[in-house]
Amino acid sequence: MPLFPDTPRTRLADLEDGEEAEFFALLVQKDKSTTRDGKPYYRVQFRDPGRTVTAMVWNDSPQFADCHGSWQPGHFFRMTAKFGQTKYGPQIDLREIRAVTDDDRTDGFDPADFSESTKFDRPGLFAELNSLAQEHIDDPQVLRLVTEILDDNEAMLLTHPAAARNHHAFVGGFLEHVVSVTRTAAYLADKYVDLYPEMSPPLSKGLVVAGAILHDIGKLIELRATPAGAEYTAEGRLVGHILLGRDIVRDKANQIEDFDAETLLRLEHIVISHQNLPEWGSPISPHTPEALLVHYADDIDAKFQMMASALSPTDAQDEFTGRDNGLRRMIFRGLHRESESPE
């Protein structure tokens, strides 16, 4: 039954600023904190495929006890709330809320509707990744290593997200990100091979492309997919995708007879240095030209996707977005201009 029979029911993504309605949403994050007075509260996030919103659950609100005791990320809820665009990002004020039941399916609830996915064809992305390897990797040992790793993990690659949050954190996000990084890395390799033919040793486009394809391969172990999005595995929290990825590359190289030791060293270095800084997870910064190109190709793709996501279509008329985005900054939309009245 509807929570409030007289309240319109819609999708969270379709709510307009100031509108109150009933809708289904997935709880994706729940963070506990305290006020300056030492009173506990929760900052929770709900989403549907088109929008993520924040709700504040204060200790004196009627929802606090349930939030504290039973609300868990990954669970679906039916709620009535008022939506608003604020300087902190999209938020809702909860009026009434309960966990979804099987009876809600008759009112249109389907959990499959809440899995955000890449807008690109996933089998097509996988095929393109293999094509990029075949086109640009001229070392047969490296080509075998890359294609076998891709084939070994095809099922996971078709669905895996690239991150738990921030960039490409959706079904197929891993493939979307890696294909984009590899395209950019191949372009940069062509550019700098032509600009600096005198380099010794010369820039290896094949290693650049191989490193781009494999730079995040450890995320297949670091993350697991859930209805609420990706979450970290024990290996992910204790080791991290950089070293897990290096292990995948090293293990596969050990299966290939007489794999060249220096080539493996250079490929491992691309994987472990691609995030550049210790605070970002890399134990060492790029010390080869191939690693440098992969780092910047990866960095620009992640950051641009975060900015593009923050600037996705919205009815907001503000000159700047809120800070509730992967870049944690207010992004300029454009100067606000009042519509002129006809004379």
Image: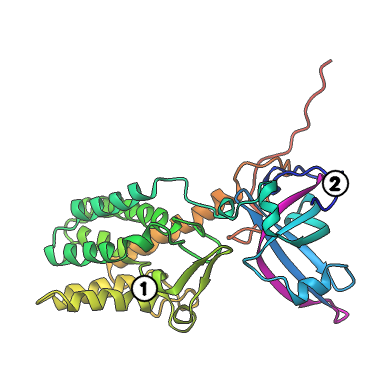
Report which residue position mark 1 lands on: 273
Residue 67 locus on image (x, y percent): 77, 71
Q: Nearer the viewer, residue 79 or 110?
A: 110
> Dot 1: what SS?
helix
Is residue 323 in sight in this rendering?
no
Q: Residue 105, relative to residue 67: is it above or below?
A: above
What is the three-letter code of the residue carrying label 1? Ser
What is the three-letter code of the residue carrying label 2? Pro
Q: Nearer the viewer, residue 133 or 188?
A: 133
Magenta highlight range: 18-39
Report which residue position mark 2 lands on: 5
Is residue 100 in sight in this rendering?
yes
Quadrant of residue 274 within the rendered picture: bottom left
Which residue occupies the extreme left position in the image? Answer: 258
Residue 191 locus on image (x, y percent): 27, 50
2 or 1: mark nearer the eye: 2
Q: What secondary structure prevails in the magenta region? A: strand
> Dot 2: what SS?
loop
Within-10-Å neighbours for mark 2: few <14, some 14–19, many 20+:
few
Residue 298 locus on image (x, y percent): 40, 60
